[in-house]
Amino acid sequence: MRDNFNLYGLRGRFAFYDHALEMILSTEAPDEDDLADTEFLEIYRDATDLYGLIHARYIVSPRGLQVMREKYLKGTFGTCPRVLCDRQHVLPIGTAEEPRNAQVKIFCPKCEQVYSPKSKYKELDGAYFGTSFPQIFLQSFPSLVPLEFTRAFMPRVFGFRLHKQKSLITRKLEEEGVVQIGR
């Protein structure tokens, strides 16, 4: 946080940048008078967003990637809600780089889809993780990329496959040449 390189380009994005950075680095907790002051609350809001954007930069640093790797392996961010992904651990992702545009989502490395989380993380701002985090993470740790292909849902009626009916995932895989027709 004290390294100017990590703060590059952030100054112009906040009205109270200097005060917000000072608040982040301070060890003092706000008292009741502070919480009643509207200017303090504006600075606090800037401090929260500034901290979140610094966090987005930190998690793609070598040290941050190691911390996130441990969280991923523990399943801290949850599992994919898609049943056919077999409880694959997921990664947080933002859908916007600007704070206050969208809440955090989860990315499944197995089906490569983005979902809304149902965990305590659903209230976090997506910009605090950035739009590139999962891709950088998986490129940094290629051994964590699931090797098995996503199983496609096979629509059936009374156990019989529907004639010429395929799931969207099966069609997509066939278009990419991954699945043979008639499987």
Image (cartoon, rainbow, N blue to C red):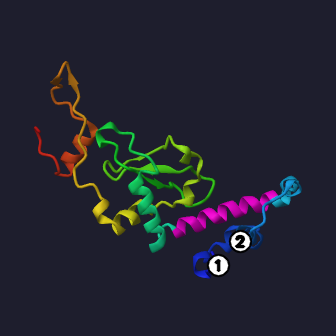
**Which residue is pictured at 60% across the width and 52% down the height?**
101
**Amino acid type at image mark 1:** Arg
**Which residue is pictured at 47% across the width and 65% down the height?**
67
Residue 14: x %, y % from top left: 71, 67
Residue 125: x %, y % from top left: 59, 53
- Left or right? Give the position of 162 relative to 112: left
In the picture, the disc for residue 2 is: 1
Furthest toward the bottom, the residue is 4
Residue 151: x %, y % from top left: 23, 42
**Mark 2 neighbour class, 10 Å CA radius: few under 14, some 14 to 19, many 20 or more:** few
**Which residue is pictured at 75% across the width and 73% down the height?**
18
Q: In the rendered image, is residue 102 in sight?
A: yes
Q: Does the magenta-highlighted stretch encompass residue 46?
A: yes
Magenta region, residue range:
41-58
**Amino acid type at image mark 2:** Leu
Q: In the rendered image, is residue 61 in sight?
A: no
Q: Does the magenta-highlighted stretch encompass residue 88?
A: no
Lower sequence index among marks 1 and 2:
1
Q: Identify the main secondary structure in magenta.
A: helix
Circle 2 is placed at which residue position?
A: 25
In the picture, the disc for residue 162 is: none
- Left or right? Give the position of 85 relative to 59: left
Label 1: state its secondary structure.
loop
Q: Are marks 1 and 2 in contact (CB under 8 Å)?
A: yes
**Which residue is pictured at 76% across the width and 68% down the height?**
16
Q: Is residue 70 above or below residue 26?
A: above
